[in-house]
Image: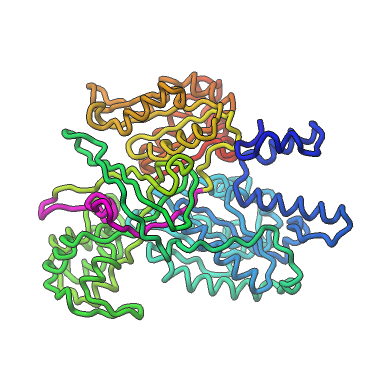
């Protein structure tokens, strides 16, 4: 079937024999935007050469240039590793170096044995897991099939969140494994926390300088024909967000629910921003004013006192409200406060043999909890320097622009709970929940190329999204309906209670009635004595699940990475074992192949 984005008439008019057209469609099915641009440039170069013109530059075969080229490979879950890898590749290209930029799942592992210069920028997710797009490459390098790499010089930049115990674990493992395979470390590994640029900036400069020393600049840049048109930089992005008007702030859960889940609608009119289903909306949060005042009171600090840090001079209250993380606790701050409070208890928590207790503290406590439990004296300057910078939060977009136009819809769980010393909130979710219609909120679009609907509208899709993980699938169903996709849509949704927590209930029921949704499996875990989750429904529907996959269906999972995603993956593996006649190892290979084909995608957090 032709890709959904290409009119059938265009294919019917294509000057290709039928035996060439089918392989072309198989080749393009599943390619992301970068891959398609590369392919178009390659074809344009061949066409120009065939016409007798000057051949356009095309990517040289790896064997021909591997000794004089820098390969920059990234594994990214939220876009930060991709952003830094793109920055490094662009700077290397501007310096006249031959460079290729690859997402980890596009890296040809067969070429690793001949690679000469490799830079890896990779994040760590959840409990020490690689990003989904890097799983196959990480497994390959860690496995027995990895070759000796005595010819390779390399460098690794790890990204992570020190709120988690396995901080930058994947970058550390890759760095050590490449050395174990005989490769030479050209630049020392760096581990970047949420304050990414303070670590990544110097590393990028050092890595670029090392690449310049290792490679001779290629021919003058003026002779290079770009393979893709240079994109126009959007007016609004991560560092220049758009002030979006809040149109709708509606509670989805009803009274009696322990959850406060909001349906949010924002106007993007005049922003120039566009998105595809699967993309995320980035929001720059602000800390709740009541939380800021609690911190100031706990430390007996003057919020109006000016504090200088990093070349900026602002009132302490503004630093704490707009510039510093207060709702996420990280190990470095625990260590700093242990010193300020001279706390033996905190120091014991920081010991290696108390890792589980520290993990629990980081998960359950905020900065204010630590300050209130353990007295310690801080100056404003010390506090601003010790706290991590406030970072944007990403929310899966719950709409299709083909239906809602210049709007973006979100499904947001409001984080609000009572603690020993008062109410606690999540920075971004509370900002959204408390905002009134007409308020302006700073947002931008974060593309997610790994989480895309199949271009072939005849493909079936299976969507697994418990809780707010259902958000992107609302956009998927809207998009498929607008496109007139003929493939079936199967949604598995779960939450605690049917009566109070069935998000978008009337929409799903209408979609079932109209034929936009073909199957809906529900798991309300607390409505019966034995808890039932989406993974249980998967096992119950294992035969149908396997048949859909064997028929070419695409599978999507969205939600919590630490437990749900692992339980769902285990249920998928069990379904393949039971209904596909495979052992556990073959079932894992089956799912890995689906991931490599772009037919098993996860958006987990």
Q: Position of residue 603 (x, y in %)?
A: 44, 43
Residue 10 inside the magenta-drawn segment: no
Residue 467 placement: quadrant = top left
Q: Position of residue 179 (x, y in %)?
A: 57, 60
With respect to residue 166, does 508 lie above or below? above
Q: Is residue 81 left or right of residue 253?
A: right
Quadrant for the N terminus, please. top right
Q: Is residue 320 left or right of residue 180?
A: left
Give whichever of 376, 42 is nearer the camera. 42
Q: Position of residue 546 (x, y in %)?
A: 52, 23
Q: How many marks?
A: 0
Residue 425 inside the magenta-drawn segment: yes
With respect to residue 105, does 442 lie above or below? below
Q: Which residues are magenta?
A: 419-448
Residue depicted at 47% across the width and 29% down the height: 572
With respect to residue 137, does 516 lie above or below? above
Residue depicted at 59% across the width and 60% down the height: 231
Q: Is residue 109 left or right of residue 173?
A: right
Q: Position of residue 384 (x, y in %)?
A: 26, 72
Give whichever of 336, 564 is nearer the camera. 564
With respect to residue 443, does 13 lie above or below? above
Give whichever of 286, 60 is nearer the camera. 286
Using the rendered image of the protein, determine whether residue 233 is visible from the camera's viewpoint. Answer: yes
Residue depicted at 36% across the width and 43% down the height: 562
Residue 3 placement: quadrant = top right
Give whichever of 487, 130 is nearer the camera. 487
Residue depicted at 51% across the width and 25% down the height: 488
């Amino acid at each position: 079937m032709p890709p959904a984005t290409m009119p059938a008439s265009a294919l019917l008019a294509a000057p290709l024999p039928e035996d060439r057209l089918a392989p072309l469609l198989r080749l393009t099915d599943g390619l992301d935007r970068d891959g398609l641009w590369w392919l178009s440039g390659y074809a344009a170069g061949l066409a120009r050469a065939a016409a007798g013109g000057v051949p356009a530059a095309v990517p040289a075969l790896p064997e021909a240039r591997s000794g004089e080229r820098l390969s920059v490979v990234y594994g990214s879950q939220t876009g930060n590793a991709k952003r830094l890898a793109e920055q490094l590749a662009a700077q290397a290209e501007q310096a006249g170096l031959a460079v290729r930029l690859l997402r980890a799942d596009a890296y040809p592992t067969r070429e690793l044995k001949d690679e000469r210069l490799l830079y890896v920028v990779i994040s760590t997710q959840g409990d020490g897991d690689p990003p989904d797009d890097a799983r196959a490459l990480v497994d390959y390098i860690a496995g027995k099939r990895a070759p000796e790499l005595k010819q390779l010089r390399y460098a690794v930049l790890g990204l992570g969140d020190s709120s988690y115990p396995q901080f930058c674990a994947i970058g550390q493992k890759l760095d050590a494994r490449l050395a174990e395979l005989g490769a030479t470390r050209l630049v020392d590994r760096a581990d970047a926390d949420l304050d990414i640029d303070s670590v990544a900036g110097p590393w990028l400069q050092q890595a670029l300088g090392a690449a310049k020393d290792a490679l001779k600049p290629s021919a003058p840049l003026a002779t290079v024909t770009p393979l893709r048109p240079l994109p126009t930089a959007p007016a609004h992005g991560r560092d220049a967000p758009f002030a979006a008007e809040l149109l709708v702030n509606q509670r989805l859960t009803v009274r009696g629910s322990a959850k406060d889940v909001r349906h949010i609608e924002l106007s993007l009119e005049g922003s120039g921003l566009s998105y595809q289903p699967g993309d995320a909306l980035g929001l720059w949060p602000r800390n709740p004013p009541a939380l800021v005042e609690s911190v100031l009171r706990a430390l007996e600090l003057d919020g109006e006192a000016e504090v200088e840090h990093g070349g900026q001079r602002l009132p302490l209250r503004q630093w704490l409200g707009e510039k510093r993380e207060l709702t996420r606790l990280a190990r470095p701050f625990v260590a700093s406060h242990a010193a300020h409070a001279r706390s033996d208890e905190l120091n014991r928590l920081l010991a290696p043999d108390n890792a589980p207790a520290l993990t629990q503290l980081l998960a359950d406590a905020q900065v204010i909890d630590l300050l209130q439990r353990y007295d310690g004296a801080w100056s404003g300057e010390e506090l601003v320097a010790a706290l991590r910078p406030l970072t944007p939060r990403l929310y899966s977009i719950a709409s299709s622009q083909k239906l809602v136009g210049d709007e973006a819809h979100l499904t947001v769980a409001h984080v609000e709970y009572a603690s020993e010393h008062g109410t606690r909130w999540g920075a971004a979710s509370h900002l959204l929940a408390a905002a009134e219609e007409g308020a302006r909120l700073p947002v931008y679009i974060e593309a997610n190329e790994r989480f895309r609907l199949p271009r072939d509208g005849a493909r079936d899709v299976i969507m697994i999204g418990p809780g707010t993980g259902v958000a992107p699938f609302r956009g998927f169903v809207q998009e498929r309906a607008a496109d007139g996709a003929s493939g079936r849509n199967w949604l598995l949704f779960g939450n605690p209670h049917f009566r109070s927590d069935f998000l978008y209930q009337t929409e799903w029921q209408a979609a079932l009635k109209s034929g936009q949704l073909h199957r809906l499996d529900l798991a309300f875990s607390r409505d019966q004595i034995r808890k039932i989750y989406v993974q249980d429904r998967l096992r119950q529907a294992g035969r149908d699940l396997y048949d859909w996959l064997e028929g070419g269906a695409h599978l999507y999972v969205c939600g919590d990475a630490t437990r749900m995603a692992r339980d769902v993956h285990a249920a998928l593996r069990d379904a393949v074992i039971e209904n596909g006649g495979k052992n556990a190892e073959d079932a894992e290979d089956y799912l890995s192949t689906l991931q490599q084909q772009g037919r098993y995608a996860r958006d987990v957090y």
